[in-house]
Image (cartoon, rainbow, N blue to C red):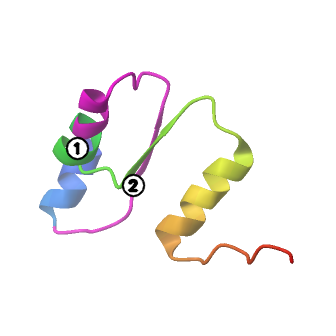
Amino acid sequence: MDWIKKLRRAGRATPVLFVTSFWKSMRDFELVTNTLGATQLLRKPALPAEIADRVDSLLGIPAPAAAP
């Protein structure tokens, strides 16, 4: 996880999606997002569609419109 810290120290705002099975509390969430600089946190197991939605969100791709 040092690479995330190095990325932030270099001034990069590259989005980071942290996928883990160890997140159990808000304290863990805050540690990963605040201390390490992850943009979003996703808990395993995650569905492929959920991962794709998060990546699209980080890349600024709008979600498809709901069918009427």
In three-dimensional space, the C-alpha distance between marks 2 and 1, rounded to whole angstroms, equals 10 Å
22 sits left or right of 56 in the view = left
The residue carrying mark 1 is 36
Q: Residues within 10 Å of mark 2 (few under 14, many from 20)?
A: some
Q: Earlier in the sequence, mark 2 or mark 1?
A: 2
Q: Residue at position x 74%, y 78% from top?
A: 65
Task: Say which element carries label 2.
Answer: loop
Between 27 and 11, the residue placed more toward the observer is 27
The disc placed on residue 13 is none
Let me know if residue 14 is in the magenta part: yes
**Residue 18 horizontal/vertical position (percent):** 42, 43
Between 16 and 60, the residue placed more toward the observer is 60
Quarter of the figure with residue 25: top left
Let me know if residue 40 is in the magenta part: no
Residue situated furthest left in the rendering: 9
Q: Residues within 10 Å of mark 1 (few under 14, many from 20)?
A: some
Between 42 and 15, the residue placed more toward the observer is 42
Amino acid under disc 2: Val
Task: Say which element carries label 1.
Answer: loop
Q: Residue at position x 27%, y 46% from top?
A: 33
The residue carrying mark 2 is 16
Tell me the quadrant of the picture where the N terminus can be found.
top left
Q: Residue at position x 35%, y 55% from top?
A: 39
Q: Which residues are magenta?
A: 11-30
33 sits left or right of 22 in the view = left
